Image (spheres, coloured by chain):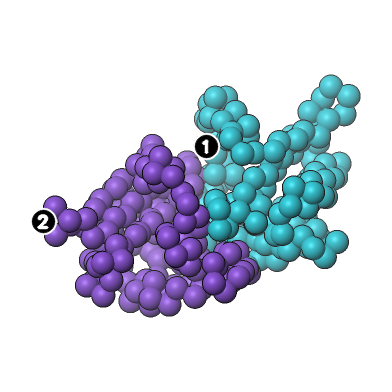
Chain colours: A cyan, B purple
Amino acid sequence: MATGDTYAFSPTTSRQDCHAYWFGPGMTSFVAAEGVRILGMYKFRANQRDLGSHVANASFMVSPVAHGMGVGKAMGQHCLTEARKAGYVAMQFNFVVSTNTGALSLWRTLGFSIVGTLPKAFKHQQLGYVDVHVMYRFLDDG
Amino acid sequence: MATGDTYAFSPTTSRQDCHAYWFGPGMTSFVAAEGVRILGMYKFRANQRDLGSHVANASFMVSPVAHGMGVGKAMGQHCLTEARKAGYVAMQFNFVVSTNTGALSLWRTLGFSIVGTLPKAFKHQQLGYVDVHVMYRFLDDG
């Protein structure tokens, strides 16, 4: 978040705002840890209410100290398993910044496809307005 | 909502839930009225926080008694004007049910394009799972 290049959150977002985002009502939240050290976290919940509630939405963060260790991939796989267990039939990412090539590549590896592109929907702190992708996959194919 | 064919809300959604949805924090809400009779309502707000907050999200409902009267179009045009005034640079609809041809046609007339399609993301009460479109337009071109 501090770099303002991957997440909608402002670098100055308060601890209270983050807490509400990650642990709000209807969310299932996990951390990746090595001993007592938190390396990443993710959450999922229904992307829409009621007649759209069979599709999960998930959000991930990996600690800068853990980049390159496979934490994102491990959390992604864990998330797919947990979302299936919870009865979801598909998973959607609403806001994958197009310049975040690491995330795009990881989500493709985990079976997600780009199903939409939001023109200039992210204000990248270095690059200005850049496109954002919506990614999606069904959960019933392993 | 009662027909369960256009909106994520369950036909049994409580009044309290609706109130929170239409008048929650950060929302700008309007009604279309003829005298004291409400014919429709809409709201808009930022679709994402902070670095995505230049894109508005809007939601509309037209009373069944007012179908065919142009209320949706009038509210859509009003919404575009109000969102521009509020400083938004684009507008996004997250959940336009693909079988809702009236809405699709109206939003196209008002300058929106389909920028994404979410496979089987809506549980239509007659047709089962159907696709949902994400629609988008910039606000600076009139």
Image quadrant for the N terminus of chain B?
bottom left
The reply, left or right, for residue B1 in relation to residue A103 is left
- Residue A51: image location, x then y, percent: 56, 58
Q: Chain of mark 1?
A: A
- Residue B96: image location, x then y, percent: 47, 66
User: Residue visible at 26% across and 75% down?
Assistant: B68
User: Residue visible at 48% across and 42% down?
Assistant: B49
For the question of whether residue A36 can be seen, the reply is: yes
Q: Is residue A64 above or below residue A90?
A: above
User: Residue visible at 82% across and 41% down?
Assistant: A71
- State the mark number for residue A10: 1
The reply, left or right, for residue A25 in relation to residue B67 is right
For the question of whether residue A132 can be seen, the reply is: no
Q: Which residue lies under the disc numbered 2? A: B35
Residue type, mark 2 in image: Gly
User: Which sits in the foreground, A9 or A21?
Assistant: A21
Q: Is residue A142 above or below residue A48?
A: below
The quarter holding residue B17 reads top left
Furthest residue toward right: A35
Disc 2 with disc 1 on a shared chain: no
User: Residue visible at 69% across and 38% down?
Assistant: A28
